[in-house]
Image (cartoon, rainbow, N blue to C red):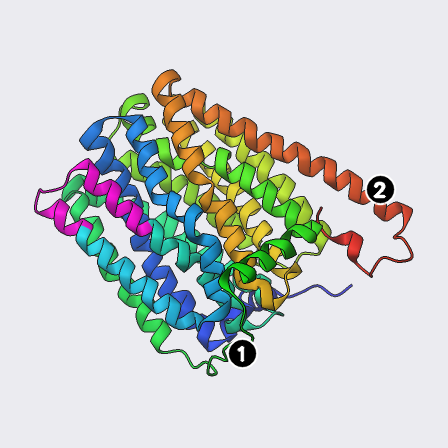
């Protein structure tokens, strides 16, 4: 049996970077995402410094993610109709402006909690349109053959930034304050804007069919509901992400009130989640069959739930950091695998709308989870709130384990004669 050389394995793992447009996009995104993570860390720290309230942290998360709930489905309709590069140039430029306004009110000392909430809501509106555009844009940069690898490398960029951004933010928070993080984030958007303008893409061909926005939206939702693999993956993601992914909301509470530490430790905790996420994103650059992808779903949810359960009750910083690593590894392994399976199953004409449903389930369910987590923490403490999130993730793992057994039994029995080839191989 032939053994792949390390050089060939490396080429395979980074094969999407052979596409010039994707190289530009990936490098610009990496730079911008470092700034975004810096702002995310500084924003949570700022709100807790201003209010010392876990409930206000939950309200901050609600304001930032609620627009995704409201607008992401319509954003998917737009993404399927317009030039995605132009859409991203608009959203990224407006995000730079939002970061500049936040930096200004903080640097001048005018900031009040309501201002942070309003600007978080504004960011959420932009994010609702940006996320489906970015996710559905990848196939135009690399083609369908390299799409799974592009998704993995995109996730790797996100999680590399998740390591670097919070670490830098921790230093800046301790030295120059939150304003420095916000100013650097505003500047970081120039990298992705520049990369988008440098791409060589064929002219956008508009859809000549005239359908109302509402009918287009309904067609996308109907397509997802009538396709069992898409329906099951999206519903599971909505439950687990909405109720189980709320660790970031309460990290300032763990840092200040439980570990009695400062912004440096806050940045360290966020980076610990990021390092684990980066490892799982690296694993996703490998090629997996559907059985391997389903296994990743189970491993991801189990690791995330177990890590978060221990994280909730740890009072020893090294153990807390280690469990953050385990949780981060599991969360991104699960999310990146879900994204890959969705995109491999989706027809190109529905891609923007399915990615908007992915955004709705992944990000748009967060307002409910953020408010619930903040409310539980306010009444019963952060550890109990995080333990609830862990139980949701472990419940999702049990469901995936059950579905894997059902699919294995179905495969062993053989597909019905009327089934299309490979139909029983999709995640249900």
x and y percent of residue 274 in the render? 42, 45
Total numbered circles: 2
Position above or below: 86 against 115: below
Image location (x, y in percent) of residue 368: 44, 34
Q: Position of residue 231 (x, y in %)?
A: 65, 48
Callout 2: SS = helix
Q: Nearer the viewer, mark 1 or mark 2?
A: 1
- The relative height of residue 246 versus residue 360 in the rendered view (above or below) is above
> Cβ–Cβ below 8 Å for labels 1 and 2?
no
Q: Position of residue 257 (x, y in %)?
A: 29, 22
How crowded pointer 1 is (Cα within 10 Å; few <14, some 14-19, many 20+) is rated as: few
Residue found at x 79% / y 44%: 407
Q: Which segment is the magenta one?
A: 102-123
Task: Identify the residue at the far left of this view.
Answer: 108
Q: Is residue 75 left or right of residue 172?
A: right
Question: Does residue 104 appear anywhere in the picture?
Answer: yes
What residue is shown at x 57% (from left), y 56% (from top)?
218
Residue on which the image places disc 1: 208
Name the image quarter holding residue 88: bottom left
Q: Which residue is mark 2?
A: 409
Residue 23 highlighted magenta (yes or no): no
- Choose the circle earlier in sequence order: 1 or 2: 1
- Secondary structure of the residue carrying tag 1 is loop
Magenta-span inclusion, residue 113: yes
Q: 22 or 71, which is in the foreground? A: 71
Task: Give the distance between the C-alpha atoms of the residues marked 1 and 2, in whole angstroms.
Answer: 45 Å
Above or below, 249 relative to 7: above
Q: Which residue is found at the position 37% from the left and 42% from the top? A: 271
Say few, some or many: other residues with alpha carbon within 10 Å of mark 2 (under 14 / 14 to 19 / 20 or more): few
Taking the spot 68% from the left edge, 45% from the top edge, the residue there is: 295
86 over 426 or under it: above or below: below
């Amino acid at each position: 049996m032939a053994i792949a050389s390390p050089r060939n394995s490396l080429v395979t793992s980074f094969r999407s970077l052979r596409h010039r447009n994707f190289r530009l996009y990936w490098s610009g995104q990496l730079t911008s995402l470092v700034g975004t993570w810096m702002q995310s860390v500084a924003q949570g720290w700022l709100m807790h410094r201003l209010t010392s309230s876990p409930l206000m942290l939950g309200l901050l998360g609600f304001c930032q993610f609620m627009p995704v709930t409201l607008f992401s489905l319509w954003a998917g309709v737009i993404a399927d109709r317009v030039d995605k590069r132009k859409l991203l140039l608009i959203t990224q430029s407006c995000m730079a402006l939002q970061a500049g306004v936040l930096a200004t009110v903080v640097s001048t000392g005018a900031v009040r909690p309501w201002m942070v909430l309003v600007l978080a809501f504004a960011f959420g509106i932009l994010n609702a349109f940006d996320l489906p555009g970015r996710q559905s844009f990848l196939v135009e940069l690399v083609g369908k053959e390299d799409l799974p690898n592009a998704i993995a490398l995109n996730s790797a960029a996100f999680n590399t930034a998740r390591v670097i951004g919070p670490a830098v933010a921790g230093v800046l928070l301790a030295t120059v304050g939150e304003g420095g993080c916000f100013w650097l984030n505003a500047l970081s958007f120039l990298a992705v804007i520049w990369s988008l303008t440098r791409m060589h893409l064929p002219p956008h061909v508009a859809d000549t069919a005239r359908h109302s926005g509402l009918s287009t939206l309904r067609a996308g939702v109907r397509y997802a509901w009538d396709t069992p693999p898409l329906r099951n993956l999206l519903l599971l993601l909505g439950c687990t992400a909405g109720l189980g992914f709320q660790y970031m909301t309460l990290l300032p509470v763990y840092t200040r009130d439980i570990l009695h530490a400062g912004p440096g430790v806050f940045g360290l905790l966020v980076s610990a989640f990021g390092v684990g996420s980066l490892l799982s994103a690296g694993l996703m650059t490998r090629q997996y069959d559907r059985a391997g992808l389903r296994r990743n779903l189970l491993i991801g949810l189990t690791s995330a739930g177990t890590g978060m359960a221990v994280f909730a009750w740890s009072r020893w910083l090294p153990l807390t950091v280690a469990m953050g690593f385990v949780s981060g590894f599991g969360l991104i392994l699960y999310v990146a695998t879900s994204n890959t399976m969705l995109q491999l199953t989706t027809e190109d004409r529905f891609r923007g709308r399915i990615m908007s449903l992915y955004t709705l389930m992944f990000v748009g369910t967060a307002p409910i989870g953020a408010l619930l987590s903040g409310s539980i923490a306010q009444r019963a403490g952060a550890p109990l709130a995080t333990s609830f999130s862990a139980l949701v993730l472990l419940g999702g793992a049990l469901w995936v384990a059950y579905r894997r057994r059902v699919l294995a039994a179905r495969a062993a029995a053989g597909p019905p004669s009327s089934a299309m080839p490979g139909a029983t191989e999709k995640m249900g």
